[in-house]
Amino acid sequence: MTISETSAKEKLTAALGSVVSGVILTATKIVVGLMTGSLGIIAEAAHSSLDLIAAVITYFAVYFSNKPADKEHLYGHGKIENFSALIETLLLLGTCGWIAHEAIERLFFRDVKVEASGWAFAVVILSIAIDVYRSRKLMEAAIKHKSQALEADALHFSTDIWSSVVVLFGLFCVKIAEWFPTYVFLHMADAVAALLVAVIVIGVSYKLGVKTIKALIDATPEGIIDSVKKSAESVPGVTACNRIRARYSGPNLFIDVHVHMDGNQTLYEAHLLMDKVEERINEVFPGADVTVHAEPA
């Protein structure tokens, strides 16, 4: 199995694990919600259904982005991952908007009774455990394989951890208010915490969204031009380096570079020198697809 095949398999395994976890979590919340009649848990089940849809989108994005280049897609299908990450970012922002709206409604306009049953605590704790596991696995795979789709999915589920912690915090506050009626104001604690989480997640989502859009419009990755120029000009025989272009397509980096060299050498000698330039650039950017064009100095 080649390195690219191993990478594709690991990414798909991480994405599929997220889908399976989503199915288990959504089904559990639906069953418990129907058993207890808790509207809060049923709402959480609806939220998990949205997460499941996001996980399925990520899986298919990773699956299709792994397809090799063809005559219609000469740079491969990596942009599918970037597009998937953008969709997930929009879903995150939409979720945060809903959380913020609900929090403001509960703080100022309507009183919502939170049911703090044993089943509710159990489901939320299970949700946190599953989300911690799958967000960690997804982020590990995202960093290892430079996958924006998996990174967006990991971010999505890490926000679910925070929202579940807020729910758990709210349940504890409700219990305290039940035990000590003097602290009835604690019923508002979960709404305040949820609002703070929504603000934090919006900030993180904005950064991911900017990064994703830059990849989609082929913005030059920061710092790459200088690094490529320095690497190419460090090769003996190269007198200058210019017209450098770089872009990401999913996890794949493409670099085009023009190098100046002695115009009196043979084609074979020039070709060997270009190979050295490519090898030197690949030392700094492993796995990059490098195209070198030679010009006489």
Image (tube, grey):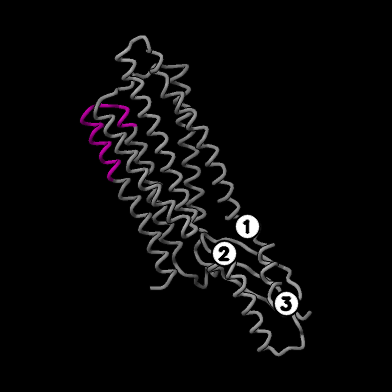
Query: Which residue is denoted by mark 3 in the rendering?
Result: 238
Image quadrant in which the C terminus is located: bottom right
Pick the residue in front: 53 or 153: 153
The label shown at residue 284 is none
Q: Dividing the picture into quarters, in which one does residue 48 lie?
A: top left
Position of residue 191 in the picture relative to residue 211 (left or right): left
Secondary structure under tag 3 reads strand
Position above or below: 97 against 147: above
Q: Earlier in the sequence, mark 1 or mark 3?
A: 1
First reached walking from the N terminus: tag 2 or tag 3: 3
Query: Residue 173, position in %: x, y?
Result: 36, 21
Instruction: Tell me: 285 left or right of 193.
Output: right
**Kind of residue sitting beneath label 2:** Leu
In the image, which is nearer the foreground, mark 1 or mark 3?
A: 3
* 2 or 3: mark nearer the eye: 3
- Our reading of the magenta stretch's main secondary structure is helix
Q: How far apart are marks 2 and 3 (CA)?
A: 23 Å
In contact (CB < 8 Å): disc 2 and disc 3: no
Residue 253's label in the rendered image is 2
Q: Name the amino acid, label 3.
A: Val
Q: Residue at 52% across / 54% down in the picture?
A: 82
> Quick one: which residue is furthest to the top in this view?
182
**Extent of the magenta region:** 24-43
Secondary structure of the residue carrying numbered label 1: loop
Residue 226 pos. (x, y %) = 69, 62
Residue marked by disc 1 = 221
